[in-house]
Amino acid sequence: SKGGYDHFMEKEIHEQPKGIKETLERRLDDQGNIKLDSINISKEDLDGINKVYIVACGTAYNAGLLGKYAIEKFVKVPVICDIASEFRYSDPFVDENTLLILVSQSGETADTLAALRDSKAKGARILSITNVVGSSIARESDDVFYTWAGPEIAVASTKAYTTQIISLYMVALDFAIKKGTITEEFYKEMIAKMKELPDKIEEVLSNEEHIKELAKTVSGKEDAFYLGRGVDYNLAMEGSLKLKEISYIHSEAFAAGELKHGTIALIEEGTPVIAIATQEALFEKMVSNMEEVRARGAYVIAIAQNHNTTVEKASDKVIYIPNSDDILSPILAVIPMQLLAYHVSKLRGCDVDKPRNLAKSVTVE
Ligand code: M6R
């Protein structure tokens, strides 16, 4: 049932505080430490791993990109994140010292499953992050971490994405504390900040009317662009996918620093640009990029943390999110993009939950 909402997608967007709470708190022990129930990767196992791949498709791949960032930052090992259908045919350097992390809501995506089988045959250790208990990917993996998002019905993935990110962050923190690459203090502090996310997401959701208004400025357009730097670029990819998938507006995500290398030629009078600026160290650079596109006529909708009000000088509209850590802000910033895509799709009279040409689970290659 849609629980009083018009569409499953809207319901699922609103279920994110609960999904994150479940994903996180079910894995905290009495001392508040992470307990990865069905993952049995010891410090010795970790010492034997010299390559980490994260492999997935679509939104799960976008979540994987944030996982790569967290693992590299916390565990201090290089991580390659790849699209399953590319990874499979790229003759990857997989051997018995490889950890392959698969991310899949359904646990049934054909290319992701094939990547699992190929890598397993080469001796890799397989850790999967999935939402469906007993799915093919879950069954064939060495270790499984379930995202407790609850069933996701809408084709456009929302709560699976945010819970996948939380799961990847928990795995990263667990590996890092085992390997001693982060301090106990940092570990505790990150967990405490993650626990604050459900309430902060509620705060973002309470701003839905504002986003619904902004949807009107996008719904009549043919193109939209999403810009970001660092993890905000990965987030831009997810925002853009959400919009194109359910509203059929052509949208693309760009690393903001790449503008001058071609992309800026696309900006016309009134082109909507969603500019994500949650990263403290990159904030000023993003503001300059907003000014650049605005000078060429773009209509800039910025997403920024509450305290960064100087963003207003470079944008037409701002969606504020509660202040948070650089690494956690993306989880807050994606919510308004999900809502924007949802309301644009609705305004355009699209079939929100079942967009044309798409299936919830892609079980063909
Ligand atoms: O079930 P999976 O997570 O493996 O599915 C992967 C993609 O097919 C999926 O995320 C797709 O991109 C969504 N429709 C995006 O909203």
Image (cartoon, helix red, strand yellow):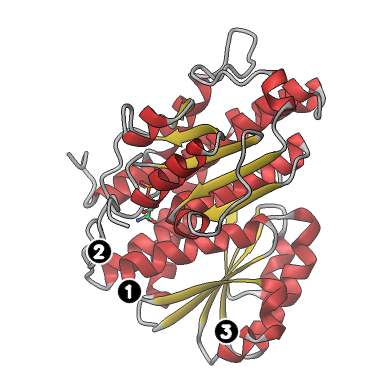
| Residue on which the image places disc 2 | 355
Q: Amino acid at mark 1?
A: Tyr
User: Residue lying farthest top?
Assistant: 30
Residue 290 in which image quadrant: bottom right
Disc 2, SS: loop
| Residue on which the image places disc 3 | 298
How many circles with numbers are drawn on the protein? 3
Q: Amino acid at mark 3?
A: Ala
Pair 3/2: label in front:
2
Residue 273 in which image quadrant: bottom right
Tell me if mark 2 has few (under 14), some (14-19) or many (20+) residues whose alpha carbon lies within 10 angstroms of its own. Answer: some
The answer to whether the residues at label 2 and label 1 have Cβ atoms under 8 Å apart is yes
For marks 3 and 2, the one nearer the N-term is 3
Tell me if mark 3 has few (under 14), some (14-19) or many (20+) residues whose alpha carbon lies within 10 angstroms of its own. Answer: many
Q: Judge from the rendering whether residue 227 lies leftward or rightward of residue 141; answer left or right.
A: right
Task: Give the residue drawn at x 63%, y 58%.
Answer: 232
